[in-house]
Image (spheres, rainbow, N blue to C red):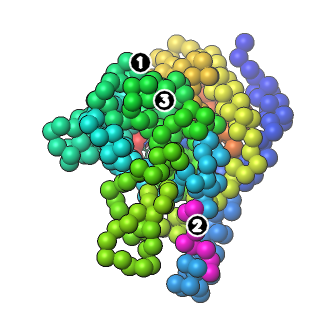
Amino acid sequence: MPPTRDDLARLDAEDPLAPRRADFVLPDGVIYLDGNSLGALPRLTPARLAKVATREWGEGLIRSWNQAGWIDLGRRIAAKIAPLIGARADEVAVADSTSVNLFKLLSAALRMRPGRHAILTQADNFPTDIYIAEGLVGQLGPAYRLQRVAAAEIAAAVDEDTAVVMLTHVDYRTGALHDMAAVTRAAQAKGALMLWDLSHSAGALPVDLGGAGADLAVGCGYKYLNGGPGAPAYLYVAARHHAGFRQPLSGWLGHADPFAFEGGYRPAAGIASAICGTPPILALAALECGIDGFAGVDLGALRAKSMRMGDLFIALVEELCAGQGLTLASPRDAERRGSQVSFRHREGYAVMQALIARGVIGDFRAPDLIRFGFAPLYLRFIDLWDAAEALRDVLASRDYDRPEHRRRAAVT
Ligand SMILES: *Cc1c(COP(=O)(O)O)cnc(C)c1O
């Protein structure tokens, strides 16, 4: 028997994370199942942005680099991200976008493994990960290559020519979760470095880069971390690699002494050399509000809620929408799933548009996936019931056949 709405209301009443919902602005009439793509707005962010703009920028002007601590803001945020990903504060930097950070770290990895020429990745990794690797090997010349294999073949495909294995921890389409420690061991056993993309992991489940022995990682600030649209990203370089770490975007703020204005580049010691140029202070201020939302949160409780939500949503949808052409695209075993559930449907795009028109916001990923993300900080169990019921209504009424639900927008 699937749970009733009353069962779910009881889970909300017992949920230790339930009070966190009040920390977010969530519009009435909206069930937000897209926190894995753009996290919700923390209640404190608008006032913080107003303060940074009017007081620190407007009145403080350039003095605020020192007096308002702007120059240290990225480092402060990195130290707050570190415990979410199992890193030390001095192994994390906040900068640029995930795409740019991938370029920096892949370049550095190839340099750390001279004589090896391949970047190995999952064939259907997130597009920007693949595109950035393509751009990098294209620039380095014909000796270098990007090798793409199926998820199950990754470990076996690592060989003496593999410089770095680059994987996304949680698959953006299906939510399938890699075994970070096992894959890292397999890569390193053959002498390769291991780079994890944590974009769909951090803030949704505990990550232990240190425990897994990972070498490098990147991740996104605007998904589960709630840093705002286009928020700065983060990167991780294990401390044991700092001495040999050189990345090619050798901008002045990664210099050992930026305000000496020396004639040539000398990298800063440690993670600081991963920085390129001047940090976006308004965007960092918003990101810090997002990260602060995790202060005091028990990541084990977060993961437990997320796994339970996924299990319940699968059970509800399979019961309420039986016979309506949906197939589960995510692992059924919560241990092997991130914080999202996806279903395939022939009319997936239109089905999602019809759901969004009813205030149930998930997203669509080509060719046929409807995707529902569960941000455990602000989602309620009853939201799952209401979303599954809306999905049943959309499918049973064939509401998705209406022409307005079939027009493709630029962002899906
Ligand atoms: C969201 C996401 C990105 C985003 O990269 P941007 O540079 O911020 O556009 C990269 N990789 C993965 C796996 C993602 O899920």
Picture disc at residue 368 = none
Image-quarter location of ligand 1: top left
Residue 181 falls left or right of residue 150: right
Q: Is residue 66 above or below residue 133?
A: below
Residue 81 falls left or right of residue 136: right
Q: Secondary structure at mark 1?
A: helix
Q: CA distance from mark 1 to mark 2?
A: 40 Å
In the rendered structure, which disc, 3 or 2, sits on the residue that comes first in sequence? 2
Toward the left, the furthest residue is 142
Residue 30 visible in the snapshot: no
Q: CA distance from mark 1 to mark 3?
A: 14 Å
Amino acid under disc 1: Ala
Reading the image, the residue beneath label 1 is: 152
Closer to us: 391 or 280:
280
Q: Secondary structure at mark 2?
A: helix
Amino acid under disc 2: Leu
Q: Is residue 283 above or below residue 261?
A: above
**Magenta-colored stretch includes residue 402:** no
In magenta, the rendered stretch is: 67-75
Picture disc at residue 184 = 3
Residue 77 falls left or right of residue 352: right
Q: Residue 90, image x and y in percent?
A: 58, 54
- Within 10 Å of the Cα at label 3, are there few (<14), some (14-19), or many (20+) other Cα atoms? many
Picture disc at residue 73 = 2
